[in-house]
Image: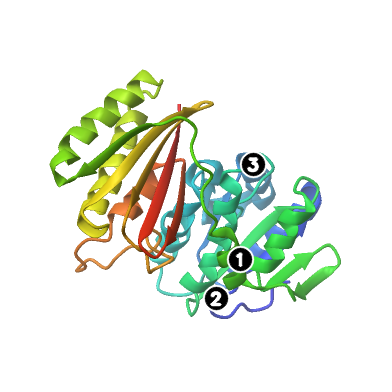
Amino acid sequence: MVDALGPFRHPALFYRGDSAYLDGVVPFVLDGLDRGEPVAVAVPGRNLLLLEKALEDRVHEVRLTDMCRVGRNPGAILPSVLLAFAGEHAGPVRVVAEPMWGDRTGAEYPACVLHEALINNALVGRDLAVLCPYDIAALPPPVLADAERTHPEVWGPAGPFTSSRFDPEGVRAEFMRPLVPPPAAVERRFDIAQLASLRGFAEIWAARHGLRRPRRDDFTLAIAELTTNSVLYGGGAGVLRLWAEEHQVVGEVTDAGTITEPLAGRIPPTATTLGGRGLLLVNRLADLVRTYWVPGRTTTRVHFSC
């Protein structure tokens, strides 16, 4: 399973139980370290503890991160975990990234699948190997089937195999679905004249619905970025909707813009590029970001946990 890894590889590891998890992940990590490759591990907290113990005296050589924190929004994993780590090193790197676990919500799941599909385009040609573990005891068969569609190879209990289902473009088309209409929401139409007042309105609304600082400041900033994008790139106007769900506040901005780059908000622009950082910031701030677009209309929805 750990033969020399060429420029971008993206295997899924199907595991059942702690022993199988360690048998798949630890050799991948140690082989990278033995080759002099920087290694990062971003997995849920329980699995992070397993790996800390299993790696013993070599654990200090690995960057360990709790994916439940850095990857709570799947749209942040590519810029904040994968590209951030790869960008620190000139040569080949390895990352263990576990974006999907049993407690992911139904709203988060499509964002996870899209993330897994999109990184096949975003990272092609890079000297980077990303191993994605999937717990076959906790995840239902449709999730595992989608993993085979987003990973060109799978390391399963019976050994590695090439995925005949691999179809990231088909996954992107299938999971770019219209967002479910919100329940009763506060709605504000806006153009450039209302931008400043919208920020204060969003902050007051969020406070009334239980969002405390500093997360309330993050929510307000995300709404400001989205509404500003609508004015600058979405036809000069838009509609803001705000509503509360169980333990969350949700904001949604719709405008007349068309997103032509599926990786918008996931690939950091170059230092000399003007603009292009608003959606990137929103992905880093929010607990979940969902976007749907068709020609002439884009809707972006952000979730913040209270």
Classify the position of the C terminus by image quarter.
Answer: top left
Q: Nearer the viewer, residue 66 or 233?
A: 233
Q: How many marks overall?
A: 3
Q: Which badge, 2 or 1, is on the more N-terminal residue? A: 2
Q: Which residue is mark 1?
A: 171
Q: Which badge, 3 or 1, is on the more N-terminal residue? A: 3
Amino acid on which the number 2 mark rests in the picture: Phe
Q: Which residue is mark 3?
A: 49
Q: Which residue is mark 2?
A: 8
| SS at circle 1 | helix
Q: Based on the displayed image, in which of its 4 quarters is residue 66 positioned?
A: top right
Q: Based on the displayed image, in which of its 4 quarters is residue 298 positioned?
A: bottom left
Is residue 203 shown left or right of residue 93? Answer: left
Amino acid on which the number 3 mark rests in the picture: Leu
Q: Nearer the viewer, residue 93 or 301?
A: 301
Q: Residue 168 in the image: state x and y as whole percent.
A: 60, 70
Q: Is residue 188 visible?
A: yes
How packed mark 3 is, by other alpha carbons closer than 10 Å (few <14, some 14-19, many 20 or more), is: few
Residue for point 40% across, 73% down? 90
Q: Is residue 27 visible?
A: no
Alpha-carbon span between mark 3 and mark 1: 32 Å
| SS at circle 3 | helix
Q: Using the image, determine if residue 223 lies above or below residue 255.
A: above
Classify the position of the N terminus by image quarter.
Answer: bottom right
Residue for point 47% across, 53% down? 75
Q: Residue 67 in the image: state x and y as whole percent.
A: 55, 46
How packed mark 2 is, by other alpha carbons closer than 10 Å (few <14, some 14-19, many 20 or more), is: some
Amino acid on which the number 1 mark rests in the picture: Val
Q: Which one is closest to the eye, mark 3 or mark 2?
A: 2
Is residue 243 shown left or right of residue 65? Answer: left
Is residue 9 shown left or right of residue 299? Answer: right
| SS at circle 2 | loop
